[in-house]
């Protein structure tokens, strides 16, 4: 099976998200206005105008310009990223000019790297604005959410292993659990709508459904613009070649008597309805990109440049929790449809599952709505970096009351999943399911388990198996590597210590060629998971069965190796990982660059399936039930015996079609050179990351402009202590600190975000005058503020003398490690410099906000001086068992 076909199933988060409730509709809802097109994103300026250096940074900018060059065709006239530049392409999207939530999430990463390199964050914000306008359904697209009942989230419909078992009959006799987060989300955001991306859209409306953003009805073939569609709906054997496209707004304008609904679900009657499916890995990747964008912008002194977008990413992460629950909110460990329905959070498996989905009636006079999670979790969809950000970064922790705890639990659970699935060779196996065979069937007695879920070698899709494609290794482990580089997580380090050598052993780079693994074969299964005593998985094994030049996968593998190499320590394996990543990126750039981007030639033997016809039983081909007939918007007939091509006749008008037709007529398999959007971004961001992590940083632009003078300086007297406050200065780059002078002598300094200072221990009944100056990172100093004069009073003999206090607390723990925090609080007199005795036996290689030496923690510099009652926090990753929460000794 061709490697591109291997990934043809991997974006299909829509798997078996059958519509789960049906009522007879009265009238179709009217169309709404299409959202305004966001302003076009700026194209990168000429290389000579950029304050950058570093060979790989310049290569990033060159590739960035190619991606944004309108003549290269990566974006639609609406500014939407296509899945690929080329149109004749069938894999997970069944047409090259469709788009996916995956493409949007990679676009955000591209603009994150651009902002890090240039300091320009408008393209990043523009990408999110476009995502919000065209990939998150509008109010008109999901009009009856208010009718959703969290105590009855959906009607059960079983999944089956082959499309010929569909339509799947709705069954009200199977109990479903309660949705534990719907009310919380509605209370938090004041709406019953879902803020998540639908996974698939027909950007040029090639199918002609016209399921447009902002519309509650199908606008048909005359609509010019993007259209929400879906494909995969019928079990793990339904490859892209066996799908029947359908609109996400089904008002029965096209298809059969009941639109497309009765191809997928069986019911007594059918209602016109809307339905969307979210691919959680894409939303998580968007959150992940927002974390790094916020980090980079903050380091540049301009966090406000991305603050609004980061807030939206936090909100998306709140709704992403729907992917952490079983499909029908049943408890983990199900082996029959009568297994317990969940209540509260006991239906959560806390893994990023293959999808979550939601839908409802189009008829607002007879409203209803449903929501489901998914019972299947693939390791390649997990994003522990996003889970860490959503549970640790104050700017990304969602607003809902229980979201932070949910993501903290998910972080640990996701890392454990990697540990459970790692083979002795190093590769990561498939995943787990709570619904055997898709309908909570009785599991084999010997199947390995993980928190009640069962091991499955190929989660969700079997044609081809979903864990044969090497890309899942790159996608999944890249996030583990980021977590390691950013936090020093020792569990992540242990996973990488085994995975990295395995990958490097299978990468070959020469001056003329290069290759990476493309196909994997698995045997055996892991041990039952025991968090306290993990097994060695001696019965699990992986073999590389094919090699190739997938530039996108290579970019993901390079990033994984780079983040590992940049992590704590200087192990020789890290140096080898860096060198391998360097050589791989060098080979791609010198051997695969072309005027449009980077690409390699693919021989598409899987295109023989364009004209496959279903021949009965478990055979391939598009399955249409006997007696069913309907039409596509262009008149293509949907009936038994139709092929993939028969219901997509527009392919025959493609300028490249003759090559496929020759192959179908007995000629050689066609060769194509594809420029997939996600693959270009994977390589581009790897180039930018290489210089960021290992190369010399670009020199900042010359800064000669001083900050403005602090204003409105005021003094408040309390005995012999004076509290000074002032209005913040402004600067063309960033204010990094303030110096406070008393009677012409500097007596103290504070950081650039602090606008107060406590001057204590002064003489009694004495007049003083204070001024404040601001400075920036380049050493430019503002003019002094106007002076403020005050007279001290009598010293208070009862004033407290303690300089500071400190307390330790555990933020989170796992097997072999924990995250701790020490909070320092200044006494009533403030403190200029402090030190804290560390908890006994503390061992850490990753501490932030301070420095640890000889059992004593000292401040980082910017948090050394604290006013009365002010606090500073030092965080760290510790090894071993966390100490008990305790008071620590703090002195000035």
Image (cartoon, rainbow, N blue to C red):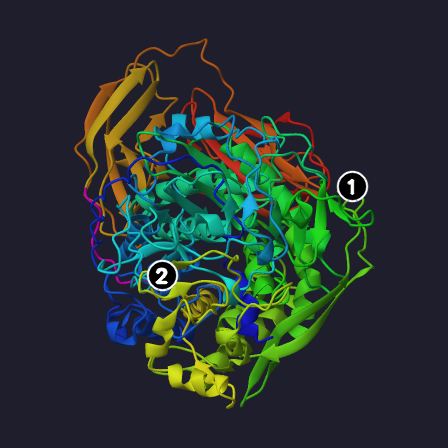
Residue 632's disc is 2
Left or right, residue 193 beside residue 623 = left
**Percent position (x, y) of residue 159?**
60, 48
- Residue 835 showing in the rendered view: no
Quadrant in which the N terminus appears: bottom right
In the foreground, 676 or 98: 98
Kindly report the distance in space between the C-alpha atoms of the residues bearing marks 1 and 2: 56 Å
Please provide the residue range marked out in magenta.
700-708
Where is residue 311, by image quadrant?
Answer: top left
Pointer 1: what residue? 532
Count of numbered badges drawn on the protein: 2
Q: Circle 1 sits in a helix, a strand or a loop, which is it?
A: loop
- Residue 36 showing in the rendered view: yes
Residue at left offset 64%, top offset 67%: 468
Residue at left offset 54%, top offset 41%: 373
Q: Is residue 891 above or below residue 237?
A: above
Task: Tell me, yes or no, whether the two marked residues, 1 and 2, touch with CB atoms within 8 Å.
Answer: no
**Percent position (x, y) of residue 755?**
30, 33
Q: Is residue 64 magenta?
A: no
Left or right, residue 581 beside residue 28 = right
Few, some or many residues within 10 Å of mark 2 (<14, 14–19, 20+): many
In the foreground, 17 or 795: 17
């Amino acid at each position: 099976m061709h490697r591109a076909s291997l990934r043809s199933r991997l974006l299909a988060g829509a798997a078996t998200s059958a519509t789960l409730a049906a009522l007879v509709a009265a009238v179709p809802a009217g169309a709404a206005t299409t959202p305004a097109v966001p302003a076009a994103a700026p194209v990168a300026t000429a290389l000579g105008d950029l304050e950058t250096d570093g060979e790989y940074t310049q290569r990033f900018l060159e590739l960035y310009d190619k991606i944004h060059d309108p003549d290269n065709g990566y974006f639609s006239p609406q500014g939407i990223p296509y899945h690929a530049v080329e149109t004749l392409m069938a894999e997970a999207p069944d047409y090259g000019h469709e788009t996916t939530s995956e493409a949007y999430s990679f676009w955000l990463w591209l603009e994150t790297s651009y902002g890090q390199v240039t300091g320009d964050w408008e393209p990043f914000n523009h990408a999110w604005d476009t995502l919000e306008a065209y990939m998150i359904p509008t109010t008109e697209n999901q009009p009856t959410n208010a009718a959703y009942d969290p105590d009855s989230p959906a009607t059960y419909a079983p999944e089956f292993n082959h499309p010929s078992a569909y339509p799947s009959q709705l069954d009200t006799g199977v109990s479903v659990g309660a949705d534990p987060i719907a009310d919380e989300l509605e209370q938090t955001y004041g709406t019953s709508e879902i803020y998540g991306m639908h996974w698939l859209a027909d950007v040029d409306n090639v199918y002609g459904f016209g399921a447009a953003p902002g519309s509650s009805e199908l606008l048909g073939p005359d609509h010019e613009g993007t259209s929400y569609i879906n494909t995969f709906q019928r079990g793990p054997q339904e490859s892209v070649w066996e799908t029947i496209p359908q609109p996400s707004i089904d008002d029965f304008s096209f298809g059969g008597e009941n639109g497309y609904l009765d191809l997928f679900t069986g019911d007594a009657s059918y209602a016109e309805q809307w339905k969307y499916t979210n691919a959680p890995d894409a939303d998580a990747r968007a959150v992940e990109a927002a974390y790094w964008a916020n980090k980079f912008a903050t380091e540049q002194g301009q966090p406000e440049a991305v603050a609004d977008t980061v807030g939206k990413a936090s909100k998306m992460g709140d709704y992403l929790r729907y992917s952490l629950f079983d499909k029908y909110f049943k408890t983990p460990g199900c082996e029959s449809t009568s297994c317990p329905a969940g209540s509260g959070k006991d239906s959560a498996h806390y893994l990023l599952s293959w999808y979550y989905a939601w839908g409802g009636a189009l008829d607002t006079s007879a409203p209803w709505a449903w929501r489901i999670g998914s019972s299947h979790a693939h390791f390649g969809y997990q994003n522990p970096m996003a889970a860490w950000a959503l549970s640790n970064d104050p700017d990304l922790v969602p607003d809902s009351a229980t979201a932070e705890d949910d993501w903290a639990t998910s972080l640990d659970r996701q890392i454990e999943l990697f540990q459970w699935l790692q083979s002795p060779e190093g590769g990561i196996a498939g995943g787990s399911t709570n619904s055997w065979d898709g309908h909570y069937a009785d599991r084999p007695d010997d199947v390995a388990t993980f928190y009640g879920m069962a091991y499955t070698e190929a989660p969700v899709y079997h044609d081809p198996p979903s864990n044969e494609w090497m890309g899942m290794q790159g996608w999944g482990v890249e996030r583990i590597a980021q977590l390691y580089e950013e936090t020093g997580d020792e569990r992540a380090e242990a996973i990488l210590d085994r995975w990295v050598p395995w990958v490097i052993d299978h990468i070959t780079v020469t001056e003329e060629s290069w290759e990476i693994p493309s196909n994997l074969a698995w045997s055996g299964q892991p041990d039952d998971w025991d968090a306290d005593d993990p097994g060695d998985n001696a019965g699990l094994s992986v073999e590389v069965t094919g090699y190739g030049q997938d530039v996108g996968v290579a970019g993901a593998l390079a990033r994984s190796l780079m983040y590992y190499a940049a992590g704590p320590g200087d192990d020789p394996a890290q140096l080898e990982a860096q060198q391998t990543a360097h050589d791989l990126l060098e080979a791609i750039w010198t051997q695969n660059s072309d005027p449009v981007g980077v690409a390699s030639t693919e021989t598409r033997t899987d295109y023989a399936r364009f004209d496959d016809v279903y021949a009965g039983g478990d055979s391939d081909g598009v399955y249409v039930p006997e007696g069913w007939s309907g039409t596509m918007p262009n008149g293509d007939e949907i009936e038994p015996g139709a092929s993939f091509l028969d219901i997509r006749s527009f392919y025959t008008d493609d300028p490249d079609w003759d090559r496929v037709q020759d192959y179908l007529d007995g000629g050689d398999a066609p060769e194509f050179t594809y420029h997939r959007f996600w693959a270009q971004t994977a390589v581009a961001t790897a180039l930018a990351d290489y210089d960021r992590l290992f190369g010399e940083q670009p020199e900042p632009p010359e800064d000669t402009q001083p900050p403005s003078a602090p204003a409105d300086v005021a003094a408040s007297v309390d005995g012999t202590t004076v509290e000074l406050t002032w209005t913040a200065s402004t600067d063309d780059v960033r204010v990094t600190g303030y110096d406070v002078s008393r009677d012409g002598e500097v007596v103290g300094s504070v950081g650039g975000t602090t606008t107060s200072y406590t001057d204590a221990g002064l003489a009694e009944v004495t007049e003083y005058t204070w001024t404040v100056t601001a400075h920036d990172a380049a050493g430019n100093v503002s003019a002094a503020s106007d002076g403020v004069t005050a007279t001290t009073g009598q010293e208070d003999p009862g004033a407290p003398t303690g300089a500071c206090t400190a307390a330790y607390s555990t933020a989170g723990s796992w097997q072999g490690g924990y995250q701790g925090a020490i909070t320092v609080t200044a006494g009533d007199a403030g403190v200029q410099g402090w030190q804290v005795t560390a908890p006994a036996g503390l061992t850490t290689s990753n501490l932030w906000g301070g420095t640890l030496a000889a059992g004593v923690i000292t401040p980082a510099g910017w948090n050394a001086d604290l006013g009365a009652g002010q606090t500073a926090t030092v965080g760290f990753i510790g090894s071993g068992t966390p100490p008990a929460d305790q008071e620590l000794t703090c002195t000035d």
